[in-house]
Each structure stands twice: as structure tokens, then as C-alpha cells.
Amino acid sequence: MGAGHAHVLYRESGSPVHRLPPEVKIAAMVLFTVAVVATPREAYWAFGGYALLVAVVAALARVGPRWLLSRALIELPFVLFAFALPFLGAGERVEVAGLDLSVDGLHGAFNILAKGTLGVLASLLLAATTTTRDLLLGLDRLRCPQILTQIATFMLRYLEVLVGEARRMRVARVSRGDDPRFLWQLRGFAAGVGALFLRAFERGERVYLAMLSRGYTGRMPAVWQGAGAATAGQWAAAATVPAIAATIAAVALVLQ
């Protein structure tokens, strides 16, 4: 994968967060999420502190709240489930605006909304400040199993190739008068999917043999690691957010 490959969520910028090595950002995001999940659901003030941390990082990364909130809509199915909990929960009941709601269900709904939203926002900030190549590079530096990082690397590298192949196959099919769009035309679509699978498999074999002929041994070459591994200062800077989050979580657990 060339350095120019970037995913749709990446936002080009020269912010301090963008300049951090990917491995420190990945570790900080994971540790922050763990601290959020470990926080008791009754500690409402703690989630306010986490939201403030996310807002500070977003400001440093120059990622606007509108962009974050619009992409956070991916959690909408979980939001709908959370809204149903106060009505479906058992135990003690309380009347709110004329509605008979479960106290435990209200706590559960807040727990899902708060922790889920914070986790999604943290992930979006990581995606917005890190290219696809850097994400994989960071995982590799964090000693993620090589087989996983290589599968992800090749999948992302050749995804555009497969999409282009599927597009050409569709154009060829339509030019021959076949444009399956309805349920009774699924046979043509299924045949196209099968043909695409065979072409992808055969191309994968050819690519693998070409890699072997160029010295591939099952591991990415050393040049993949490249320069720019995180320094102690960068690790310390990135550790600020999870350290504050861990402190908030610890206080919340003590006060529970």
C-alpha cells in the first residue's frame, strides 16, 4: 500500500494529533475506551469528564463537532435499543412525564448511550487522524499478529481492484441486455458474484506467486516498518488522555 491510500473518514491536517505515531494513538484510544467501560453507570459526572476529554482532543485534531456527530449516527440501532430499555426493564418503576418506566432500564439506557457514544467518538477521532496504512503500521508496531495485519493490508490494497472488476463485469452484463434489479432476476446477480469470486481467487494466486518470486517469506519486509517509531516523549503525550480517564474511572469506582 502506498502512503497515498486513505479511507473515507481520514481528514488531512497538520495537527499535533495527526503528527503522533499511529501506535500511540491506537494504544491511547483502547485504554481510554477500557476506562470508560469500567466506569460505574451511576457516575454521571465521570462521563461528563470523558466527553470533555474527547472535545479537547477533537479541538487539537481540528475535527469539528458537526463532522463527529454526523458520523456517530452509525450507533443509531443501539440508541433505539437503549430507548426501549426503560419500557422493557423490570424492577422498581418510576413515573416520568406520565410514563411508567423502569429505574434499572433508565440506568441501562444511559449506560449504553454514554459508553457507546464515547467509544464511537474515540474511534472516529482515531480514524480521522490516521491513514489506513498508518493504522496497519501501528498495529504491526504494537506486535499485533503478523497474519492479521498482512490479511488486512492485502484486503485494503486490492479492494479497489475487486470493486473495479465488479464494475467492469456489470457494464459487460448490462451491454448484453441483462440488468438484474428485481427478485426474479437474482439468478444473473448470483452468477456474477460467483464469477467475481473465481476471478478474485485466480488473481490472488497470481499475486501470491509473483510475491514469492520477489522474495516474500510470509512476513512484511523491514522497509514496511519505516522510520518514525514513537519516542518516549510522544508516548508520554499520548498517555495523558488515558491517564486522566483512568483517574476518573478510579475515583468513580471508589465513590460508588
Image (cartoon, rainbow, N blue to C red):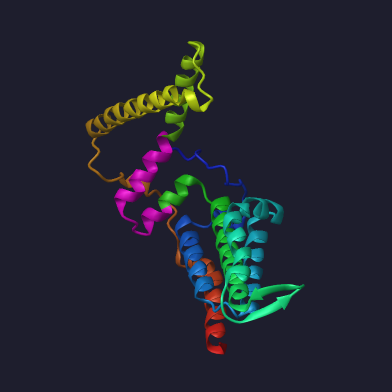
Task: Tell me what residue is drawn at x 56 percent, y 85 percent.
Answer: 251
Residue 63 seen by the camera: no
State the image coordinates of residue 216 (x, y, percent, origin top left).
Answer: 25, 38
Return the residue nearer the eye: 125 or 95: 95
Image quarter for residue 166?
top left
Say which residue appears at 42% left-offset and 49% top-offset: 136
Image height of 156 relative to 253, above or below: above
Magenta segment range?
A: 138-158
Q: Name the image quarter holding residue 141.
A: bottom left
Work out which quarter of the rendered image holds the C terminus and state it.
bottom right
x, y percent for residue 250: 52, 83
> In this picture, is 219 found above or below 43?
above
Q: Residue at x 69, y 74 (%)?
A: 100
Residue sitting nearer the eye, 165 or 85: 85
Vertical placement of 60 versus 225: above or below?
below
Q: How many marks?
A: 0
Point out residue 90 in the picture as x, y percentages from the top left corner. 56, 76
SS assignment for the magenta stretch, majority: helix
- Quadrant where the N terminus lies? top left
Please tell me which residue is depicted at 47% across the width and 59% down the height of the picture: 26
The extreme bottom residue here reads 255
